[in-house]
Amino acid sequence: MNDCVFCKIRDGQIPSLKVYEDEQTLCIMDINPLTRGHCLVLTKSHAPTIWDADVEDLQAAIATAKRVAEALKAAVQPDGLNMLQANGTAAFQSVFHYHLHLIPRWNNDGKGFDWKLVPGDREQIMKIGDKLRTHLGGET
């Protein structure tokens, strides 16, 4: 992908602050952090979304996320951690290369991501659950 900023970072064409790298993944500090310590875990293979990514790359990304999360816990001592991953413009994805945001959080930090719990339509929930089971090829 010639125009992918994360591929350019991976290839050393754009500077970044790398904090971890292995054969399948790369972790960089986010240049627009929501909180201190906010970093990104990227797959080295280009895949725009989770739907496009290979399972092996996704497994490597989550393993790297765990490793980096442990390091974040020790380095910045957050009260919590958001792991965010967006797919498509409707989900506010801005860089179309699979990546995970690791965002350290502190109690009363004034940042968002919370939403009010509103009970859903039970019949609709059950219908969608049935459709998912059908597409997954099994019964539970």
Image: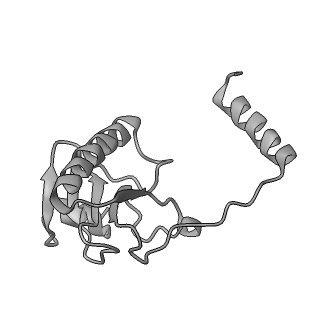
Q: Does residue 126 appear to the left or right of 46 in the view shown?
A: right
Q: Does residue 54 appear to the left or right of 126 in the view shown?
A: left
Which residue is at 59% across, 68% downward? Answer: 90
Tell me which corner region of the image, top left, top right, bottom left or bottom right, holds residue 96: bottom left
User: Looking at the picture, how far across and down is residue 32, in whole percent?
Assistant: 30, 78
Viewport quadrant of the C terminus: top right
Asked if residue 38 is positioned above or below residue 59 in the image, the reply reads below
Which residue is at 23% across, 59% downward? Answer: 77
Asked if residue 118 is positioned above or below residue 64 in the image, the reply reads below
Asked if residue 20 is positioned above or below residue 33 in the image, the reply reads above
Q: Is residue 11 visible?
A: no
Tell me which corner region of the image, top left, top right, bottom left or bottom right, holds residue 15: bottom left
Colouring method of the image? one colour
Question: Looking at this rendering, what residue extends furthest in the front direction?
Answer: 107
Q: Does residue 126 appear to the left or right of 100 in the view shown?
A: right
Total labels: the figure holds: 0
Viewport quadrant of the N terminus: bottom left
Q: Does residue 139 appear to the left or right of 36 in the view shown?
A: right
Tell me which corner region of the image, top left, top right, bottom left or bottom right, holds residue 36: bottom left
User: Looking at the picture, how far across and down is residue 17, in whole percent?
Assistant: 14, 67
Question: Looking at this rendering, what residue extends furthest in the right direction?
Answer: 123
- Front position in the image: 99 or 103: 103
User: Looking at the picture, how far across and down is residue 12, in whole percent?
Assistant: 12, 64
User: Looking at the picture, how far across and down is residue 132, in whole percent?
Assistant: 70, 37
Q: Is residue 5 visible?
A: yes
- Front position in the image: 8 or 36: 36
Which residue is at 80% across, 39% downward? Answer: 126
Asked if residue 34 is positioned above or below residue 23 in the image, the reply reads below
- Front position in the image: 90 or 124: 124
